[in-house]
Amino acid sequence: CKGQNTFLQESFQNVVATCQQPNMNCKNGLGNCHKSAGRVNMTYCLLTGRRPQCTYRTTYQNQFYIVACNNWPGLPVHFLRCL
């Protein structure tokens, strides 16, 4: 069971394009974070049960998001948070 997870309802191509947005500082001080250009639909799942019956509470959101990207070739490597 995973404690929580967020699923972006967005094409991989559009998430990759987020890496072309202006750089911003991440919480760890690195400057390889990027904020989405617009709000996107996403599904947030929060664990409410335990093994072996992993159950989740699901909420639907429409928010901006921040991803960390590799400098080259400019691909998203980590979803950080939604805003």
Image (cartoon, rainbow, N blue to C red):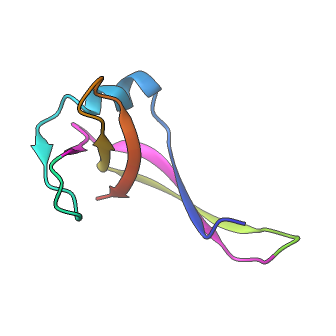
| In-image side of 18 versus 29 (left or right) | right
Residue 19, given in percent of the width and then of the height, sits at 25, 32
Task: Verify whether residue 38 appears in magenta.
Answer: yes
| In-image side of 6 versus 78 (left or right) | right
Residue 65, given in percent of the width and then of the height, sits at 32, 49
Is residue 15 visible in the rendered structure shown here?
yes
Q: Name the residue: 40% across, 22% down.
A: 13
| In-image side of 10 versus 51 (left or right) | left
| In-image side of 67 versus 59 (left or right) | left
Q: Name the residue: 40% across, 47% down.
A: 78
Which of 81/77 is in front? 77
Q: Name the residue: 56% across, 58% down.
A: 5
Residue 26, given in percent of the width and then of the height, sits at 21, 57
Residue 29, given in percent of the width and then of the height, sits at 16, 61
As drawn, 24 above or below 13? below
**Magenta region:** 32-50
Task: Verify whether residue 41 appears in magenta.
Answer: yes
- State the quadrant of the C terminus: bottom left
Which of 24/57 is in front? 24
As drawn, 43 above or below 53? above
